[in-house]
Image (spheres, helix red, strand yellow):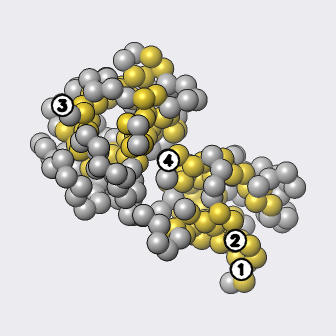
């Protein structure tokens, strides 16, 4: 499980384990992580746990939220990322011994392979010509029937990607992002980012994740994909 190490001028102030679905950060005392400094907004940012992925979202703060020196609105955190809020640095770490593989996201325009092996492969990510991205998540669970997603429309139509990791993020960062999570009872699909909701078989995905069945059609960010499971 991931944790946050908060420091100021190189001195560690606190460590916080990420265990809740949402962890708030700000100057106000009701936040989960309180940083009592005027450079920090009352409700500055929120961390969202989706499967084993952790996203950070800036809540329209006055001074902004930065990751590794770059201003962000919402972004998936990777091991060793440094979140900067005012003079405070918050390092995101994945505890040693956890079943972790670093997420990799290829740049948009990288073609998907025509097929992928059903057996687990080294961690990799795939972009597609529609401008979206597919990011693989974390290490495997107990074996179950192999599954994949197949793109149905656009320039990448016909391309198929095996779901070999616990969490796979799909969509266009900053526009619409969703996740497919492997659980002992099967795969579930959840909305992560974007004002418009993705759909499964034409039905909008709300707050609760949707259990996927082979043949289900997913649509998000203008792309249609079919969930296929042996």
Separation of residues labelled 2 and 4 (CA atoms): 21 Å
Residue 15's label in the rendered image is 2
Q: How many marks?
A: 4
Q: Nearer the viewer, mark 4 or mark 3?
A: 4
Residue at (35% x, 55% y) in the render: 140
Residue 12's label in the rendered image is 1
Indicate the position of residue 201 as horizontal and vertical percent values.
36, 17
Indicate the position of residue 166 as horizontal and vertical percent values.
39, 50
Separation of residues labelled 1 and 4 (CA atoms): 28 Å
Badge 1 vs badge 2, beta-carbon distance below 8 Å: yes
Residue 157's label in the rendered image is 3
Q: Secondary structure at mark 3?
A: loop
Indicate the position of residue 72 as horizontal and vertical percent values.
56, 54
Residue 66's label in the rendered image is none
Q: Does residue 1 appear to the left or right of 124 in the view shown?
A: right
Residue 51's label in the rendered image is 4
Q: Earlier in the sequence, mark 2 or mark 3?
A: 2
């Amino acid at each position: 499980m991931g944790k946050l190490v908060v420091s100021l001028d190189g001195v560690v102030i606190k460590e916080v384990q990420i265990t809740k679905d949402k962890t708030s950060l700000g100057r106000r005392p009701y936040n989960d992580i309180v940083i009592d400094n005027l450079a920090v907004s009352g409700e500055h940012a929120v961390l969202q746990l989706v499967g084993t992925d952790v996203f950070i979202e800036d809540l329209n703060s006055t001074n902004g939220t930065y990751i590794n020196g770059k201003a962000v609105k919402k972004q998936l955190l990777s091991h060793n990322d440094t979140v900067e809020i005012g003079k405070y640095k918050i390092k995101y770490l994945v505890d040693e011994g956890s079943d972790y593989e670093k997420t990799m996201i290829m740049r948009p325009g990288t073609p998907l392979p025509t097929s992928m092996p059903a057996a687990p492969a080294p961690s990799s990510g795939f972009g597609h010509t529609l401008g979206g991205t597919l990011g693989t998540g974390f290490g495997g669970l107990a074996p179950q029937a192999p599954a994949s997603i197949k793109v149905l429309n656009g320039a990448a139509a016909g391309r198929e990607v095996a779901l070999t990791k616990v969490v796979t993020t799909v969509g266009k960062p900053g526009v619409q992002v969703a996740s497919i999570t492997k659980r002992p009872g099967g795969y579930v699909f959840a909305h992560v980012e974007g004002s418009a909701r993705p759909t499964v078989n034409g039905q909008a995905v709300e707050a609760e994740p949707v259990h996927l069945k082979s043949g289900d059609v997913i649509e998000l960010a203008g792309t249609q994909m079919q969930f296929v499971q042996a």
